[in-house]
C-alpha cells in the first residue's frame, strides 16, 4: 500500500530539495502519479482520498518554489513540499464541498488563514481531500463523495472526519495534509490509518476560512507519516508561537507520564498502547463524562450553524447527518451552559494532573477501524465510541498527538499523548523516544 | 398612602442629619412606626412589603451612624439613611428567603457585595423585602410570602420582582431600597408604584451574594422616591466608577432624545409618556425581537441554576414558577447561542442610535398595574408583556432609569430613559429637567 512518500520524512524531502536530489516539480509529479495509479483501482475499492485536484495551480506553485530555492530564497522546511487540504478548508479558486450536496458547485473566494500560512511557508497545495459530511462524524464513510477507504483494508473505514487527508498521507500520495479536529477528526483517521496526527492547543492555528462545526471545539491540525513530520509542519506554520516548555525530567524514563486507562475499550488495543508506557502510573479521569460535555457543546453549536439549512433543504443532507442534526436541535440550552461549568471543573482537575506529570498517555481509539457502513453495535450509528478518547482534549483545548503504536489483527493502533498548552514540544520529543517507534 | 419618607428626598435627609434636625436613630424609628402601622391593615389588604425586619441590628447601626457623625466621621450621602434590601440579596445573619419554600429557614453567612458597599457608605439596613419567587417573574404576586400589594390600589399588583423594595419606598416606609433587575425587575415595580428605579450598566454593581436568575442579564439596582435619590445612592455605592459623560447638547431642549415607539401598548400610557418628549424624533427598534432574545437567554440560564431543585423537589415551587421552569428546560441550546449572535447585531444598531442621540425615551410599561393574580389576557400568565419595554436594556447591558411620568386612571405611569454605558449622569440630568417632574 505504500506510495512514493511512504517512509520519506519531511526532513528527508527538505534535504533532497536543497541538495538538488529532488525538485518541487518532481515531488509533485510523484503526487499526481500515485493519485492517477490509485484511480485505476476498481471503482468500489477506490481509496477516494481526493475530491478535487489543482494540477495547474500546483504545477505553477511548484515551479515558483523551485525558482525561489534556486535563487537562494528558502522559506523553510515546507518549501516545495506538496500538501493536501481537507475539503472544509477554503482554497481560493477551488471548490469547498464539505462532503455535502448543500455545497455542490461552491467555489471559495479566498484562502483560509491556515492555507495562507501554508503558502507563506512555501508549501505546494495539490488539492482537496474527502471529509465526513460537514465534518460532523468520525467514521469518514458519510459523504456525498462516497466513503473514504482505509488503505490497510479497503472494506474498512478510514475514520474521519479528516478522512481523505489521513488516507492521502497513509497511502504515500502526499507527505503532509491539513485537517480539522473538533472531537478527534485529525487523530481518529491518523490512528485508524497508521500515521501521525496532531491537534494543537485551541486557537493557535486560526480557523478563519474553515467551515465551522462547533466553534468552541474546532481546531486545525496536521497529518504526516510521523510525529516528526507533524512537529516540522506545526512549527513551520505557527512560527515561534509555542511557549518554551519546561524540560522533560531526563532522569525518569520517557519523562513523567501518567497512563489514563480507558474503560470499555478493545483490550488488545489497550494492551498494545500500554506496552509503550509500562512504568507510567495510572491516573483516573472520567472520559465518558467529558464526552457528555463534548456532545452538549458540539450539538448545540453545530445545530445553530445548520438551523436554516435544516429548515429549508433537509433533503440535501445525507440521512445520518440529518438525523444527527435533528437530534442535536433538541439538546436543551441549560445543558449547554452546564457543560461549560463542568468543563471548568475538569480543566482544574487535569491542570492538577499536568502539574504532576509532563504527559498523559492513552490509546487514541477504543478499537481498530470498523467496516464501512457498520451502523450497529458499539461503533454504530453516530458512533459516539469513535470520539471517546479524543474529544476530552478538544473540550479542554489541550495539545494532543496520535502516533502509530503497532497493530492489532493487522490493523493500525494509535497512541495518544496529551500535555499542557505551550508544552507541545514534549509531545514530539516523547514520540521520538518511544521504543516501538524508534526501534 | 404617604409615609414619613414620602416627599423627603435623600438630599433633605442628609441635610437634616447633619444639621441635627434628624438622627439616624430617629429616622429608623419612623421606619418601624410606618411598618407597624401598616401591619394593622386588614390581613388581605396588607402591602406585605417586608418579609424580615432586623430591628436590633438596625438600631445598633443607626446608633453607630449617629456616633460617627457626632465625632466628625461622615461617610457621605447615605450615612445614617435607612435602606431596605430585596430578599434574594444576602445580609449576614438574616434569612434570605427568595420568596420560595425552597429556602425556608435559610440564613445568610455573609453580606452580598452590594450590601457591604451600602454599609461602607453608612447606610442602615432595616430588613428584607418581598420578591417574586426566585425573582423569576415581573408581577410580584407569586411568592411563598403572598402577593406584594400596590399602595395606589391594593387589589393591584406591585410589579416585580423587586416588589417589596418598590412598595416600601412608594409607601414612604424607607427612602431607599436595593433591588435586582434581570428583565426589568427594578423598573417594573418602580413604574407601577410611582417611584424611580435605576438599573446601572451591566457589571457596575457586583452581583456576588445575590441569588442568580440569569447571570448574563442580572443587575443590582436602586429604588428611591425620585431620580435624584437614585443618582445619590448610585454614586454613593459605585464611587467614581462612572465615566465622565459627554455633556448634553444644551441648545436642544432636553438634549438629543430619540423616542422609541412601543407597539401594542396601552395608548393612554404611551400618550402620557410621549407628552414629556414632544419634540423627540421617533426611531424604530424591534423591542419584541429583543424580548425573544431575552427569553432565550434568561430561560436557559435560569433552568441551569434550578435543574437539581426541579428534579428533586418540584413541589416546593409555586405552580406558576414550576411551570415557567419546565417550559424553560425545553429551550434548545442552539437558540441560546443564536440569541448572543442576534444580541451582538442589536448592540451595533443601538450603538449607532446612541451615536446620534444622548438618550432614548419610551414608557417603562405597556400598561398600568393589572389586578393581582390576573392570569389571562395580554398581562396574563408568565406575563411576557410585563418585560416588553424593559428587558432590551438588560440584553444590551445599558443603563436605564424609570421615573414617574403621571397617571392613567389614577395609576402611576413610568417614563424610561436609556443611554450609553458610562453616561449615566445624562439620565439623572434629564429626569431632573422633565416638565412634569419639576413642575
Image: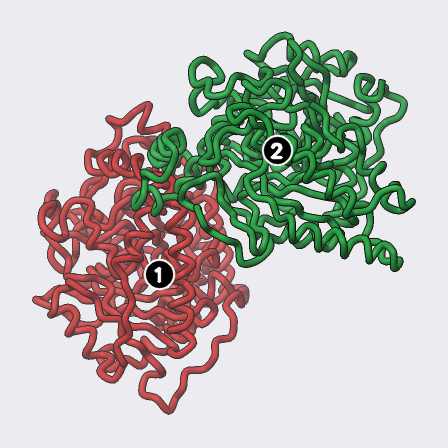
Chain colours: A green, B red
Residue name at image x 49 percent, y 17 percent: A379
Residue B393's mark? 1
Circle 2: element type? loop
Q: Quadrant of the N terminus of chain B?
A: bottom left
Q: Residue furthest bottom?
A: B251
Circle 1: element type? helix
Instruction: Estimate the x, y position of residue A173 in percent, counting from the top left.
Output: 69, 34
Instruction: Estimate the x, y position of residue B116 in percent, counting from the top left.
Output: 49, 51
The residue lying toward the viewer, choosing from B419 and B286, is B286
Q: Nearer the viewer, mark 2 or mark 1?
A: 2
Same chain, marks 2 and 1?
A: no
Residue name at image x 41 percent, y 72 percent: B352
The residue lying toward the viewer, choosing from B371 and B103, is B371
Q: Is residue A56 left or right of residue A42?
A: right
Q: Chain of mark 1?
A: B
Residue name at image x 57 percent, y 58 percent: A110
- The residue identified by callout 2 is A186
In the rendered image, the vertical position of residue A388 relative to residue B189, given as above or below: above
In this figure, what is the number of numbered marks?
Answer: 2
Amino acid at each position: 500500500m505504500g506510495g512514493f512518500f511512504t517512509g520519506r520524512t519531511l526532513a528527508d524531502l527538505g534535504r533532497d530539495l536543497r541538495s538538488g536530489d529532488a525538485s518541487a516539480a518532481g515531488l509533485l509529479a510523484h503526487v499526481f502519479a500515485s493519485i492517477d495509479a490509485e484511480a485505476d483501482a476498481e471503482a468500489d475499492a477506490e481509496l477516494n482520498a481526493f475530491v478535487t485536484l489543482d494540477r495547474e495551480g500546483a504545477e505553477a506553485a511548484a515551479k515558483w518554489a523551485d525558482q525561489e530555492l534556486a535563487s537562494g530564497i528558502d522559506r523553510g522546511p515546507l518549501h516545495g513540499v506538496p500538501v493536501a487540504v481537507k475539503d472544509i478548508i477554503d482554497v481560493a479558486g477551488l471548490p469547498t464541498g464539505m462532503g455535502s450536496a448543500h455545497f455542490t458547485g461552491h467555489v471559495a473566494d479566498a484562502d483560509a488563514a491556515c492555507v495562507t500560512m501554508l503558502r507563506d511557508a512555501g508549501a505546494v497545495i495539490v488539492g482537496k481531500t474527502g471529509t465526513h459530511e460537514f465534518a460532523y462524524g468520525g467514521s469518514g464513510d458519510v459523504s456525498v463523495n462516497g466513503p473514504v477507504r482505509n488503505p490497510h483494508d479497503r472494506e474498512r473505514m478510514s475514520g474521519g472526519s479528516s478522512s481523505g487527508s489521513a488516507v492521502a498521507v497513509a497511502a504515500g500520495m502526499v507527505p503532509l495534509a491539513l485537517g480539522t479536529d473538533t472531537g478527534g477528526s485529525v487523530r481518529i483517521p491518523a490512528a485508524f490509518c497508521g500515521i501521525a496526527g496532531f491537534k494543537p492547543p485551541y486557537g493557535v492555528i486560526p480557523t478563519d476560512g474553515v467551515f465551522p462545526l462547533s466553534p468552541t471545539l474546532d481546531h486545525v491540525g496536521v497529518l504526516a507519516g510521523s510525529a516528526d513530520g507533524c512537529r516540522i509542519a506545526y512549527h513551520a506554520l505557527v512560527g515561534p508561537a509555542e511557549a518554551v516548555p519546561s524540560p522533560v525530567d531526563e532522569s525518569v524514563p520517557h519523562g513523567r507520564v501518567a497512563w489514563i486507562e480507558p474503560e470499555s475499550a478493545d483490550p488488545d488495543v489497550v494492551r498494545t498502547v500500554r506496552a509503550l508506557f509500562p512504568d507510567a502510573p495510572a491516573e483516573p479521569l472520567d472520559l465518558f463524562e467529558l464526552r457528555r460535555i463534548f456532545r452538549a457543546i458540539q450539538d448545540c453549536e453545530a445545530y445553530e450553524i445548520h438551523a436554516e439549512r435544516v429548515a429549508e433543504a433537509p433533503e440535501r443532507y445525507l440521512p445520518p447527518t440529518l438525523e444527527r442534526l435533528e437530534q442535536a436541535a433538541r439538546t436543551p440550552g441549560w445543558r449547554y451552559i452546564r457543560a461549560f461549568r463542568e468543563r471548568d471543573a475538569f480543566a482544574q482537575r487535569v491542570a492538577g494532573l499536568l502539574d504532576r506529570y509532563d504527559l498523559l498517555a492513552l490509546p487514541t481509539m477504543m478499537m481498530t477501524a470498523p467496516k464501512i457502513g457498520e451502523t450497529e453495535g458499539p461503533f454504530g450509528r453516530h458512533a459516539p465510541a469513535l470520539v471517546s478518547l479524543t474529544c476530552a482534549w478538544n473540550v479542554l483545548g489541550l495539545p494532543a498527538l496520535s502516533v502509530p503504536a503497532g497493530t492489532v489483527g493487522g490493523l493500525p493502533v494509535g497512541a495518544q499523548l496529551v500535555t499542557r498548552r505551550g508544552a507541545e514540544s514534549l509531545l514530539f520529543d516523547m514520540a521520538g523516544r518511544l521504543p516501538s517507534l524508534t526501534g
